Image (spheres, rainbow, N blue to C red):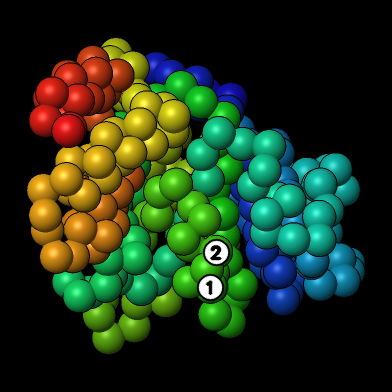
């Protein structure tokens, strides 16, 4: 794969695709940007329509890994990137999102999977909570939902064209360590709603894409204030 100046191992997970044509279109978009690892979760029947839409990318569909659950699909990867057409409200601290460009500019080394949801309803709230990062393609508020393969193509383009940066991105383990440290500080501070504060901090960390050096510096400060 050619991802500008960086190499990012990336699989594409399509959760319960409902149209064989969209499976083919997705495979074709993947081939356009040098991606070759496709995972299908409980897919529809893969008919000749998928082959017609995939064109020369048909081998990607033939070699796709077929799994029975969301958890099984994302298990082999360091970080799962969920996609959604919805926005997180200020009162909903479940998960915030980053734009495709923010995602592309900040991804570091690691084994990623990009998770595409069902054509009719996308990923469930429970599935999005299991993702390490959530991204959303900015669209008109009057009609925010994109076709699954179209949204994927936009994401692939941003990732493919990004030059990235030289700083090492903090990994999932380092981010979790920061959340654990913050949790200890929040609990010892006497806040009435420390649990919500921890959720908000987790959201910030998920979309911040801090470097390993920055993670170490923040951990040092939190460690000194943890009782």
Between the C-alphas of marks 2 and 1, the distance is 5 Å
Label 1 crowd bin: few (<14), some (14–19), many (20+), radius 10 Å: few
Q: Quadrant of the C terminus?
A: top left
- Per the image, the residue denoted by label 1 is 124
Horizontal relation, residue 215 to residue 188: left or right: right
Question: Residue 104 location, x and y as percent?
Answer: 35, 37
Label 2 crowd bin: few (<14), some (14–19), many (20+), radius 10 Å: some
Reply above or below: 59 against 167.
Answer: below
Horizontal relation, residue 34 to residue 96: left or right: right
Reply above or below: 160 against 206.
Answer: above
Question: Residue 76 location, x and y as percent?
Answer: 68, 37
Question: Which mark is on residue 53?
Answer: none
- At horizontal 52% and vertical 68% (from top left) the residue drawn is 126
**Observer-nearest residue: 190 or 134?**
190
Tell me the SS state at disc 1: loop
Q: Is residue 105 visible?
A: no
- Per the image, the residue denoted by label 2 is 127
Question: Residue 169 location, x and y as percent?
Answer: 34, 24
Q: Is residue 178 visible?
A: yes
- At horizontal 20% and vertical 75% (from top left) the residue drawn is 91
- At horizontal 55% and vertical 64% (from top left) the residue drawn is 127
**Observer-nearest residue: 137 or 197?**
197
């Amino acid at each position: 794969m050619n991802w500008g100046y960086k190499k990012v191992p990336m699989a594409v997970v399509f959760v319960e695709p409902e149209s064989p044509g969209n499976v083919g279109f997705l495979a074709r978009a993947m081939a356009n940007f040098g991606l070759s690892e496709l995972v299908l979760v409980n897919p529809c029947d893969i008919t000749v329509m998928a082959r017609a839409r995939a064109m020369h990318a048909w081998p990607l569909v033939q070699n796709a890994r077929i799994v029975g659950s969301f958890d099984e699909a994302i298990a082999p990867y360091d970080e799962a990137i969920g996609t959604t057409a919805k926005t997180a409200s200020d009162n909903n601290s479940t998960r915030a999102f980053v734009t495709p460009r923010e995602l592309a500019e900040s991804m570091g080394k690691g084994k990623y999977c990009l998770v595409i949801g069902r054509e009719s309803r996308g990923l469930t709230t429970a599935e999005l909570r299991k993702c390490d990062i959530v991204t959303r393609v900015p669209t008109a508020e009057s009609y925010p939902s994109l076709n699954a393969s179209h949204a994927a193509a936009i994401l692939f383009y941003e990732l493919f064209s990004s030059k990235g940066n030289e700083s090492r991105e903090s990994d999932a383990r380092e981010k979790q360590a920061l959340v654990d440290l913050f949790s200890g500080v929040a609990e010892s501070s006497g806040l009435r709603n420390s649990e919500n504060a921890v959720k908000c901090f987790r959201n910030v960390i998920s979309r911040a894409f801090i470097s390993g050096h920055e993670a170490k510096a923040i951990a040092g400060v939190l460690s000194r204030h943890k009782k």
